[in-house]
Amino acid sequence: MSASPRPASTGFAEARAHASRVEFGQQVRAARTVACHATDPQDRHDLLAMLGLPNPEPTPEPPPLSQALSSYVHAVAAALGVSTDGALCEVTDTATAYLALTRRWPGLPGHDLMLTWTERHGWLVAVETDPAETPVVIASLGADLTPAPALVARFVTDALAGGATAVGSPGPVADADRRGLAERMAAHSVG
């Protein structure tokens, strides 16, 4: 026996239903991604509303390190007196952060300075170079991955004043426990 063909309207309805399920799934994934980058519940709500994304239920909690790193980087920016507009952080297979500094390096005219953090090297002051080049590291804070924001600010001030010695490629610090990092960062974060 051969199957009788389905009416065209049934095929269209099934395709439309499938497309709606796919679109909803993409919106939920986008909402979860946005929620992971929010700094607090109000920020999360505002971001989702601004983008017209659904509030996924149950409310997913941002990964602890992502949230803690974002808050910690904002606290460091506040201690430095720099805008958080030039602050980025990401937690993937490695955790990293970037803060644009407002000064240029006199040794390389036209090159901005940046403060970076990685879970393997901690805080570094470096000269921004072309994207294809490795940044020139000016100073490394050392093995403490989560110093107080005021200490990071003092380190940057000293490095920019020439008080820190230039380093080559800083060696990795001890392997970091991400849960411990998140807890220590949270202890330094601004309210």
Image (cartoon, rainbow, N blue to C red):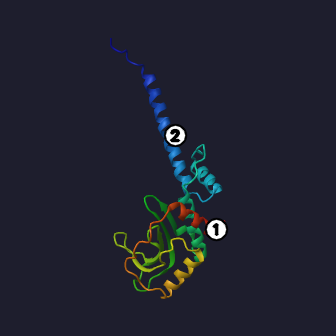
Question: In which quadrant of the rendered view does residue 132 lie?
Answer: bottom left
Residue 101 in percent (x, y) is at: 51, 76
Residue at the top extreme?
1
Q: Who comes first in sequence, dot 2 or dot 1?
A: 2
Quadrant where the C terminus lies?
A: bottom right
Q: Is disc 1 placed on a helix, strand or loop? A: loop
Residue annotated with mark 1:
190
Image check: 161 left or right of 43?
left
| Residue 24, numbered label | 2
Q: Residue at x 61, y 73 (%)?
A: 78
Q: Is residue 34 above or below residue 86?
A: above
Q: Residue at x 52, y 69 (%)?
A: 86
Q: Is disc 2 placed on a helix, strand or loop? A: helix
Q: Amino acid at mark 2?
A: Phe
Question: In which quadrant of the rendered view does residue 92 lie?
Answer: bottom left
Q: Is residue 166 above or below residue 179?
A: below
Image check: 18 left or right of 1?
right
| Residue 99, numbered label | none
Quadrant where the N terminus lies?
A: top left
Q: Nearer the viewer, residue 78 or 67?
A: 67
Image check: 2 left or right of 153?
left
Q: Is residue 63 above or below residue 163?
A: above
Q: Residue at x 50, y 73 (%)?
A: 100
Q: Amino acid at mark 1?
A: Val
Residue at the bottom extreme?
162
